[in-house]
Structure formats: structure tokens, C-alpha cells
Amino acid sequence: MKAPIKWLKDYVDINLSVKEYADKMTMSGSKVEGVEDMGKDIEKVVVGKIVSIEAHPNADKLCVCKVDTGSETLQIVTGAPNVKEGDLIPLALVGAKLPDGEIKLSRLRGVESYGMMCSIEELKLTKDYLPDAPDNGVYVFNEDQKLGTDVKAALDLDTVVEFEITSNRPDCLSVIGLARETAVTLGVGFKEPQIKVKEEAGGDINDYISIEIKDPELCPRYAARVVKDIKIGPSPAWMQRRLAAAGMRPINNIVDITNYVMLEYGQPLHAFDYDRIQGRKIIVRRAQEGETIRTLDGQDRELDNEMLMICDENKPVAVAGVMGGENSEVTENTQTLLIESANFNGSSIRATGKKMGLRSEAAIRFEKGLDIQNTIPAINRCAELIELLGAGKVVKGIADCNCKPYEKRVLKFEPDRINSFLGTQIETGVMVKIFKDLCFEVDEKAMTLVPPSFRNDIVEMADLCEEIARFYGYNNIKPSLLSGKEATQGRKTYKQRMEDIIRNTMMACGLSEAYTISFTSPRIFDMINIPRDHKMRNAVTISNPLGEDYSIMRTTTIPDMLKVLSINNSRNIQEAALFELSYVYLPVEGDVLADERETLTIGMYGGSNDFYVIKGAMEELLSAMGIKVFEFRPFNDDPSFHPGRTASLYVKGKNDELEYAAIIGEIHPEVAEKMECPERTYVAMADVSVLIEASDTNRQYKQLPKFPAITRDIAVVVKDNIFVAQLTDAIRQQGGEFLEEVRLFDVYKGAQVPEGMKSVAFALSFRAADRTLKDEEVNIAMERILKYLNKNFDAQLR
Amino acid sequence: MKRQLEAIKNQAMEKLARVSDIRELEDLKVAYLGKKGELTGILKKMGALSPEERPVIGQLANEVRFALEESIAQTKDRLIKEERSIRLKSETIDVTMPGRIKPIGKKHPLTIVLDELKDIFLGMGYEIAEGPEIELDYNNFEALNIPKNHPARDTQDTFYISENVVLRTHTSPVQIRHMQSHKPPIRIICPGRVYRSDAVDATHSPVFHQVEGLVVDKNVTMGDLVGTLQAFAKGIFGENSRIRLRPHHFPFTEPSAEVDVSCWGCDGSGCRICKGEGWVEILGSGMVHPNVLRECGIDPDVYSGFAFGMGIERIAMGKFGIDDMRLLFENDIRFLRQF
């Protein structure tokens, strides 16, 4: 809400700097978003009168004027095409400041100019503010002005304060509402408006119009006046300027008056061409299915039963509270006006406005729920202005259909409760004064309060507390720290502690943390080779996305990690390793909410990163989480991954069964190409809830060995397709009770090994807890192992 | 024989003084004190001496041997020191060359801020509560005193899944879930990912992160809210931080306040970070609206509470001087490694 200071001053005295004023208003709850000082950069620009115009001796397009400033006559050279003798114009004197610079004595084609005549552009003013300004040329005052007057005073340049008005305070979407807040904030009086309507047309409103409200829920009150002998024309400059300063374009006197009253009183009005209202009747009702109306913006609107309409005997003539209809529009030929000042149900107006995609200034106010008692002052102010501007003659009386007469809300006034809620010790007298200043009725005997009719937001104790707090000063409330309250324990849940372990382990493995956003494009599945009918494509869909690329909730984090790797790669970063702890969102049959599964995603490329590095990170994580039983199985069935370089991870959960926990591998070269990743890109995606389920934070100390171990290395040659894990498992199984560790230390293919075979070397260590082992004991175990390997894997000792 | 002994001693001492390495020293030791050494040779001849001479010469011989042994030990010591000093000199390395690192990964700046916030509130007895991002309209709006068609819905442009399901616009629905399933005293913070229909630019993202806090108990006052926020601001922005509350309106709190923290760039005197204001807006807060308590089955005549909420991106950007929110979600490794 833009409030010109001079307009506010009609209702309250503001005798401090705009900066101080803005700060005080912000701290009492009317947040100032900006201050626009219209004449800020204008100095030494005065009203001058052109007394003579002569041709420039050396230039066709210039002329030489003599301009009277009241105290002297100056020679001014101008190129403006519209100058006439006798015109009053804004003249920037030598040394004047304009928004675009300073004016100096200048010489134009050999003739000296002691200043410059100004256009509105040079004064940084708009045609909304000065509608009579020419499109090209200097501004010419259309009213008489004293010569030498500062142009800021002559043009009524004002300071405009822009307030952010919250949705609970529609009363402050008005100059009067803000003036009231100003009065309490500054501790000065509010100047109640005095309205006098002469009703020169006489007659009786009831002979002109009758009002019927069919849906009092949606329209509790509807008031109307009739104005005859309408003379449509421009509104006076003062009104145009105030409207423009408040951000509304001046149109004609009637539109301007209704807008002016809306800005001043916060009550939207609507003017109908009375003669186009059939049956001398206003009927307020819901639209019937199939009805239509063409609104003032020329759009044909389909109506439905949820929408409230202003109708005459036969048809809708306006969409209540949102926009008028073309069929009752005020035109140049309008003789008689019907002015509406009504109160509508806020949610209904909001719903209708939303359906129509219309948010007029009127609707913005109505939808917040307006003061039902404000309809009459507003329509009277409108009538008064019509008379003041000579725009028509007002018929006697108001047609006022008031279905739900206003009832005062009586609230208990409990200063002790207010103090104990705020943690303050404010004296009752101080509270009484604040409430009285806020136009509450205060009964100090009965200890009751009645909020004014424009404060629909005040309904209970907490609301009263806020009023006291904001004028007592939020920052005067003494800070305390829940002293005397029951103690509570602050600690992380098991899941939250596990998340910390995951993050810390990933970072220790050299992976940096990434954050990616959770919605994605349905096309992303094609990019990672997911088949058409795959269940992964079943995603939660956003009904109003920012675009198709952000229209579904992700069911996999792999593409997001690939995008991150791709961005890094495209920036010539040689090596990157990242992880993300986030969620995927899986639709659940029969539930409106999704299964939000926490997901650990790892991605890396470049440097020494390969499958075993990413697997190592995963193994380190398993160890950190205390997951002892797990299995990496070769996995060649995921189309996003390299079929020969991918594993699935299974962990043993609480139910003692191996459960799928993660996929880990090299990205399929086709996917890498499509996602613009390096060909050797490694990704893992783990289901964190499965890992947590399998985790175990219990640790039991195992005695450090007291006796020496015996180590033996063996290298066996086996077929290439035998997995190391098969050999390791076999060695462990056959190693006997003293086998302590089996460590792979070499896999070799090449010169000394036959084609299709590989040599696999292990270091085995044997130890007894209670004595030093004998070589013979180890020899027996080794023989057993070798025999078994030979029998089952055709392994030959190298 | 006496003269002979003294001659051996003088000669040996002279040689010892000139010895320049350990091997030479060992040779000398053998030459004088070894089994076939000169001194040993003399001692072997002691048997031929008269009983009167024997103790005198014997004592002298022992003195010479001690003197030699001591001198050899000293010389050895000297030589070792000399040699070590030469070796150390030759082993000098260039300590200005870079270290060999196995680099650890870095925490994302948003996690850094989140962790700091968690630390502060865990220390004040808060639990960390979590809830779904895809939420019921009821939990996200209606239970928070924002019915359908309430104008306050305009301030949070919402992504809808269906008429009754939204992407949560704040983590307040976690507060609702918690209040509906727990009895006071309640002290929680609710960190999490939230969504608003804002196009991506330097200061907006449709996906961002919040931490909200909620306290419900008997006799919780607005003073408690102020004190808590002060403690938070000092913890995050430094001991000298001050806060300022400005009255505002949120449907779910009454009274409501927007909270500014004294600018960490200039301590309030005005700079680029605070756009000359001296204050930076960081959070919204207030006393829990009685309607919200009622909706959660908590009697507002018995209990009261406060709530607050803040955007993590904004705090991280402020703290680390990050000027473009997109950097946080782009994950350029050179960006991440700076934290």
C-alpha cells in the first residue's frame, strides 16, 4: 500500500522526518518497504513565465525565450516545440539540480542560455502523475502559479511511503487505516473525517432502487446511492496526483472518485450506469450454471454456482467484489449513476477471483474480510466528493440492505494474563491507554474490551497481547530462557546419529557432500536407459510444476548425481568424488502420501577412482555402521550400469535375512554419453533405512593377540570367471580354527599365466589365542585348503 | 718400563687427537688396547718385574689404560656427533614443498549451518523432529490456522500434488505431527527440505531448507522466545550479535514477529551485506496461535508456546558470503572444497 504523506496528513499530524516515521511505523507493525521522495533530486527549479519567443539566429530548431521568474527575466534557449508566450513552465535555473545532473550556464549555437525549461521526463515524473503533460516538449502548468514558486510545491510533489500490509489488517489497505496506526504509533490524535453530503438532487432513493440479498452468507450488507446529472470529465489535478502517487492511473472523475475512496477508506466501490440496470433492482445472488458475463476487461466469463453476482432483474451486471460487467459500464453518455458499497465474504471473493484469474485492487481488499460498518462512511465520502467535484447531483438517502447487523465482540480484559503471556509487568493503566488509542471500548469496571468494527482480527487473548506488545515495544520485553520449566533432554535419535556416521565416513573417504533438488523431469528415465514399463517411472507428479523439467518427485538420485559429475567434468575438473544424503519419493498404492526413502548416493570419476575405490568407500561405511554380514553380488541387470562392472550389496538385517541395500558400479557408457559424464564414472545408490536396520553400534573388545602368528602366502591359477570371493570363502571355510585372516594381495593375468586364466595370491595368517602354533599344524590346514581349491575350482598352485 | 709406558700414552694421545673417523679409532683401540696391542704387550711383560716394582708399574699401567680408554670413549663421542651433524646437514629437505595429503571430503555449507543449529538447540534440551516432505494440506495449512481460500496462502506459493496433498511449504507440519503425538513439555527443532513455487535465481530456489523450532509448556512467555532467539543468534553469528523483533503477522502465531540480527558484516553500522540497514532479517517467530494448539488437542488456557522458523540457505549465504543461491545446488567441487 502506497500512502502519500500529504494524504496521510489529512488525518494525522506527522511532524518528524520520513526516515524516523518509517522506522517507528515498522517497529509498531506497519512495515515500511520503501520511501519514494518524488522531488528528491530536484533543486532550484521554479515556475517561470515565457514573456517572449524569438527565432535562434543560428539554428532552425531552437528558439530564444525570455522567461520571467518573478524576480528576474532570463534568456533561455530551448528546442521544445510547444512553447508559447504567456505559458507557465518549470524552469531549472543555473545551478539547479535535476535527477540527471546539474544545470550550468551554457551557450547553444552562440547564444547564452541561463537555465533550462523542463519536460516531465527531466523531472522524472510520469504522465500518470501529470496527465496533461505533452508527449514531447516542456511541461506547461494548467493552473495559475505564482512566478518563482519552487516546482516541488507547484506540482504538489510528495513523499510516498510504501507499507507491507499483512493479510490480517485489510483496514490498513487505506490511508485512514494507516493514519490511525500512525496516530497510535506517534502518540498524536487521529483526525476523524467529517463528511457532509448535500443530496442536492432530493427525491428518495427508494424510488430509484431496491436491493435484495439472496445469499447473506456471501453478502452480509449492500448499500447503494444514486447520483443524477452526471458530468463525466477529468478529475482535478490534486486528485489525479494523489491517485498517481498511490499507484493508480487517473481515468475520469467517476472512476477516480471510486478509486480515491477505496484508497482512502479501504472500501472498494463500484459505479453502474443506473439506466442500464433493469427493473430498478439489485439482486445479489450466486450465478446460475450456464450464465455468462463479459467483464470490464472485455473477457467473456463462464460462471458457476460458487460465484457471487450482482444482478439486475434479468442478468448479472457485475462479478461481486471482483469486476464490473460491460453491460452496466459507465460511459460518456451515462446520465445517472448507481454507486455500490457492499460487504462480501472474503473466501468467496478469493475463490471467484482465482477461478477467473483476476485480482483487482477491489478483490485484494474484499478477500481479506472488510469492516461491515465501513460501507456507509465510504459511500457518503464518495457522494461528498461527487458533489465537491461537481460531477453529479446526489439523490437523498442510501439504499442499505444490512442482513447481518454488526455485533460488538466483548472480550475479557485480563491484564495479569497478558503480562504472564508476554513475560512483562505492564501496568493496567498503560494497557488501557493503548487500547483506547486503538479505538477499543474499554470498560474498566467490568474489565471488558470491545475492539473497533474494523478490527476483525481481534478475537481472543493472544490478539490482545499482540496489540499491547507492539505498542509497549517488542524489544522492551525482557529476555528469559524458559527458567523454571521442566527440563527436557536434547539428543539425536538413532537414525540421526547414523546419518552423522554416514556423512563423517563419506568425508573421511574423500567424498564431498552435494545437495541436489528433489524434483526432476519424466524424461530423465530415458537418459539413464530405464525401460518404458519399469516401476521406477511411477512417480509422484506435481500438478502445478515450474515446468515439465521439474514436474515429478524423483524416484532415483542417480541422474542428479550424474548431473553434478557432468557439471564438474564440463568445467575441466579432472577428478571429483561426491556423496549426497537425501530422499527419493515412491508412490504408495492406496496412500495419498509417498514412501520417502532416505538414500545415500555416491559418485566419482577421474584420478585413481575406479570400481574398487567406490566399493571401498561402501565397505568403510559398512564397517563404521557395524554391519558385519554383507555380500556384494555381481549384477548385470541394471540398464543404467556397465553389466560387467556392477554389484548389488546385500546386508543382513534384524530378521536375519540378506536384504538388498545398494547398487554400486560403473555407469553404462551409453548413459555416460547421454548424461555427458566421463566414460569411467562410478555411482552407488544405497537405501539408508536398510543400512540403518542392519547397523549395530555395540562394540565388544577382543583381546589383542599374545602369541605370534604364522603367515603363508599362496598363489593359485584359476579360470578367469572364478570370483575372488568364491576363493576367499572357500579358504575361510577350510582354514580351520586357527585361520585368522585371508588377505588378497595380487591378481595377475598375462605372460606366465595361460589365456583365460588368472593368478590369485592370498596372504593367510594363522594364530592360536593361547599358544604359539606349530608349523605342522599350519601345514595341515594349507594342504586342506589347496586340495579343496583344486577340487572345486580346478586351482593349480603356482 | 715406566718411561716406555709414558711414551705409549703420549703417542696414543697424540694419535687420538688426530683421529677423524670411527674406523681409525677402532684401529687405534686395537693397536694399543687389543690382545696384541702395545699396552697389552707391556702388561704381559709385568711378570719379569721385581715384586717391589710390580705394584708401582701395575698402577701406572692401569692409569695409562684408563686414560686411554677414557680418551677413546670421548673421541668416539666426538666422532659420532661430528658424523651425525654431517649427516643431518646432508639430509636437509625443502619444508616449503607441499604436503602429501589423502584429502578428506568436505561438508556442504548447508550441513555446516544445520549442524551448528542442531548443536545449539540440542544443548538447550531440544529434540530433532522430522516429517514427510509430501504432506497433507491439512498439516501444512489448515491445522496451522490457514484454511482453504485464506489470503495468507498467497505468501507461500504452493506446489500441489492433488487438492489435499502438497509439497510442504515449511517444516511447520512437523510441529503439527509432533504436537498431535506428544504431550507437553515439547521442545523440538524441525530441520528439513521445503518447497515454494519460485523460479530459480540468485536469491530464490523452489527447493530450500528450513529449521523451525517449537516449545510448548505451561507458562511459556514471549520473553522466553526473545531469550531463546538471542541465544541462537549469539551461537550462530557471534557473541556480539543483537536481535531486533518487528511486529508482523503469521496465521499460526500471535503475537508474531519478524526477527533481524545485527549485521555480521558491520555490527550494525551499515554495509553492503545489510544494504546499509545495520540489520539483516533472518527469521519469523511468535507465540503459537491458540487455534493451532487447540487443533492439536492442547488447551491454550493451560499451555502456551512459541515457534520460530528460518531459511538455512539465507543464513549460509550470509555467513559464508555466498552471493548466488544456485552455487549451493550446483555442487562444483571447487566450491564445496572451500568449506
Image (tube, rainbow, N blue to C red):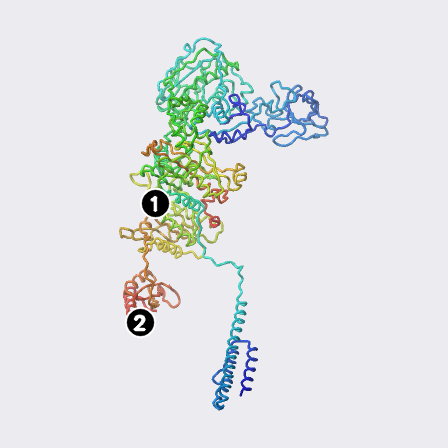
Q: Who is closer to the viewer here, B140 or B178?
A: B178
Secondary structure, mark 1, is: strand
Task: Locate residue B169, reporting x and y percent.
Answer: 40, 37
Residue A700 visible to the viewer:
yes
**Badge 1: few (under 14), some or many (20 or more) residues near its Cα, within 10 Å?**
some
Task: Locate residue B44, reporting x and y percent.
Answer: 48, 87
Upstream in sequence: badge 1 or badge 2: 1
Query: On screen, B121 above or below A161?
Result: below
Query: On screen, A71 above or below A637?
Result: above
The residue at which mark 2 appears reads as A775
The subunit carrying tag 1 is A
**How far apart are the alpha carbons under marks 1 and 2?**
53 Å
Question: Farthest residue in the top direction?
Answer: A203
* Residue type (three-letter) at the residue carrying disc 2: Asp
Q: Who is closer to the viewer here, A510 or B294?
A: B294
Tell whether B50 sits left or right of A661: right
Q: Look at discs 1 and 2 and give the one toward the viewer.
A: 2
Secondary structure, mark 2, is: helix
The subunit carrying tag 2 is A
Q: Residue A765 occupies which quadrant of the picture?
A: bottom left
Query: On screen, A481 above or below A24?
Result: below
**Badge 2: few (under 14), some or many (20 or more) residues near its Cα, within 10 Å?**
few
* Residue type (three-letter) at the residue carrying disc 1: Arg
Identity of the residue drawn at 68% across and 31% down: A104
For the residues beneath circles 1 and 2, the answer to whether they share a chain is: yes
Disc on res. A315: none
Q: Who is closer to the viewer here, A128 or A634?
A: A128
The residue at which mark 1 appears reads as A597
Task: Locate residue B210, reporting x and y percent.
Answer: 41, 40
